[in-house]
Image: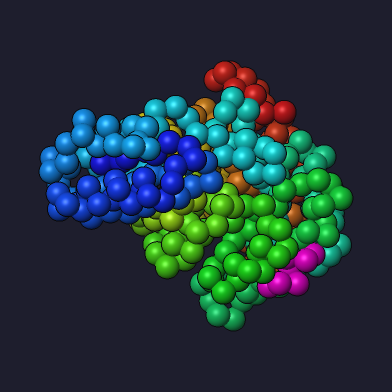
Amino acid sequence: MIIIMRDNISDKEIDFVVSKLKNVGLDVNVSRGVERTVIGAIGEENLADKEMLQSLPGVENVIRVMKPYKIVARSYHRTDTLVDIGGHKFGGEQLQVIAGPCSVETQPQMDAAAVAVVAAGCRLMRAGAFKPRTSPYTFQGAGVEGLQMFQQAAKPQRLPIVTELMDVRSIDAFMEHEVDAIQIGTRNMQNFDLLKEVGRIHKPVILKRGMSATVSEWLMSAEYIAAGGNHNIIFCERGVRSFETYYRNMLDVTAIPVLKRETHLPVIVDPSHAGGKAWMVPALAKAAVAAGADGLLIEMHPKPCDAWCDADQALTPEELATLMQQLDAVARAVGRTLL
């Protein structure tokens, strides 16, 4: 059960609702967002009288939610939520493409990438300053220095930046260097301590699906973030692990309409990590837009053959520009806009 409180309520009103819920044997989670406070009642919902709760001071609405995820569920919020990253909204009619290299390598590389992102028509930039790698002997990212290089390249082009957070100890650095959106990677989708921490800050979070995670597990991970008070969440499908070895991951296009039905939050797709090969990216990207995705996360490197990681899946600047034109046509065909 979800109890949505009115604006400008007092702690006394919140405490009163909490006491009523606890008196009937329900556990309680209070989520204080920037604009709205939401109280989640955990346990057997039939123990609480909905009409009684509705009449309590400060209560705006009471919603019964029979699923384990509550705040992120569409039954809690019937209309689509728009998540704003640096003035660009995800979840509306206009699609957003976040493009850039897999990792921050050098200042000249990042400067060239930022120019190419803008030239292609993309409005946000991605790159990894901290890199989770399968092998401990491969490039792990430039760290805090990488954040500095990223900002130095993106700011002149007025590009909001998106980068992956791997460790709670890096949050202060992310805030100091004004990261516009935090990406939680596939390996950390169920790092619940990390999810709780990003739930305490009000910076947009792009939550990638775990490589073997079910949709329900993915939604529950988002619930961890939302329960902390941060409701600025974007789901990112990046392919799941399967028995097939021809491509890197299997892009679950089915997950897009499923999520659009189950949650009010935006859904984007990473076709680069799904296919693992640059030549697959255009087809997967167009399929994602046709299936209803709200945006894309695409890898592009000024010189893919020189990339320090994931070179095989990075588009060239020219390929990205061509793809954006193609995606614009697909978007218009399904009643959306891109460029």
Quadrant, the N terminus: top left
Q: Residue at (37%, 49%) from the top-left corner?
A: 12
Kindly indicate the quadrant of the structure image that contains residue 59: top left
Q: Nearer the viewer, residue 308 or 155?
A: 155
In the image, taking residue 160 as reference, residue 184 lies left or right, namely: left
Q: Which residues are magenta?
A: 143-149
Q: Nearer the viewer, residue 131 or 189?
A: 189
Residue 258 part of the magenta-drawn span:
no
Q: Position of residue 77 (x, y in %)?
A: 40, 32
Q: Residue at (53%, 76%) from the top-left corner?
A: 135
Q: Position of residue 276 (x, y in %)?
A: 56, 54
Kindly indicate the quadrant of the structure image that contains residue 245: bottom left
Q: Nearer the viewer, residue 122 or 35?
A: 35
Q: Residue at (45%, 61%) from the top-left corner?
A: 195
Q: Residue at (62%, 35%) from the top-left corner?
A: 89
Q: Position of residue 71 (x, y in %)?
A: 37, 43
Q: How many marks?
A: 0
The main secondary structure of the magenta stretch is helix
Residue 61 vs 13, above or below: the answer is above
